[in-house]
Amino acid sequence: MLYVKDLHKSYEVGKTKYPVLKGIDFHVAQGEFVAVMGPSGSGKTTLLNCISCYIPFDKGSITVGGIKLAGQNEETLARVRNTKLGFVFQDFMLLDGLTIRENILVPRIVQGEVGQEAEQLTDKLAAMFGIEHILNKYPAEISGGEKQRTAVARSLINNPLIILADEPTGNLDSKSSRTVIEAFGNAKAQMNATIFMVTHDSFAASFCDRVILLKDGNIYRQLEKNGSRSEFQDELLDVIKEMSE
C-alpha cells in the first residue's frame, strides 16, 4: 500500500544544509494501523508532509497504491491528495459554517460528487463513529472528541487508499482520545482502512499494529504488538526511555 524507500530530506538555511530524514525505509500494508513516534526534531512531521505531497524530498521514492509521487505535476498531486489520501489533523480543520454532515461530505463536494451513495456512506460512517445524532449541528455546538470523529469520517468519505493522521489526539482529553483512536480501529475493522499516524502519545500508539520509532532522522526501532494493549504500551515506554539515554 505505502512504500517508502531510501527517503532523504534536508532543509537549507543560508549556506547551511540540515538533514532531517536520512534514508528512511519502511512499508505499510493494506489494512494496517501504523504509528510513528519520536522526540521533537526526529523527522516525524517532515516524513508525513513528504508522504502527503505537501513538500518535495531530496532523494528516494514514495509509492502509494502503486502511484510513485516523485516527479508528478501539481495537478496530479492535488488529485492524489483528494482521491487517494484521507487526512486527519490535530486541530480538526472543520468548516464552521457547514453542518457536521456537510463537513463529512466536503471531499465529495469538491469533486462535485454528492449523490445518494455519498449520503448513504455519510450515514454509515456517522453510525460507525457514534456521531449520527449531531449530523445537523455545527462545529461550535459539539465537543472536541466529536469534532475529531467527524474528521475521521470525512477522511473516509472518498474510500482513500490510506489515512494520514497528524497528532489526532493532541488537543483531546484522555476519554476523547480513546474514543477517537477506537474510531480508527473501527475503520480498520469494518472498512479495512489503512492508517498511518504521527503521534507523541504512547497510549494512542498502543492501539496500533506496529510503531515506527524515529530518532535523528533515522528509524531507531520498529515494534509490533504481539500481546495486550497495555503490554505494548509498556514496551513502547521502555524503548522511548532507552532512546533518550
Image (cartoon, rainbow, N blue to C red):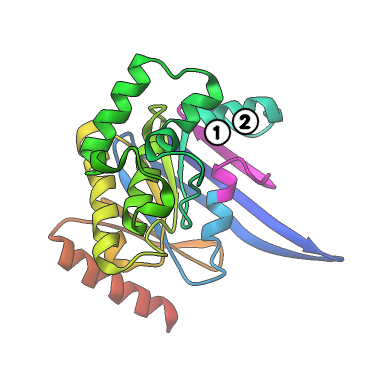
The disc placed on residue 122 is: none
Specify the quadrant of the image occupied by residue 156. top left
Kind of residue sitting beneath label 2? Ala
- Left or right: 35 with respect to 87? left
Specify the quadrant of the image occupied by residue 41. bottom right
User: Looking at the image, do the residues carrying marks 1 and 2 touch, with CB atoms under 8 Å apart?
Assistant: yes
For disc 1, the marked residue is 81
Q: Nearer the viewer, residue 150 or 69?
A: 150
Q: Could you tell me residue 179's position as x and y percent?
A: 24, 55
Residue range (magenta): 49-67
Query: Is 140 located above or below residue 201 in the figure?
Result: above
Kind of residue sitting beneath label 1? Arg
Is disc 1 surrounded by few (<14), some (14 to 19) or many (20+) residues within 10 Å?
some
Quadrant in which the N terminus is drawn: top left
Q: CA distance from mark 1 to mark 2?
A: 5 Å
Quadrant in which the C terminus is drawn: bottom left
Residue found at the very far left of the displayed protein? 228
Residue 52 in the magenta stretch? The answer is: yes
The disc placed on residue 78 is: 2
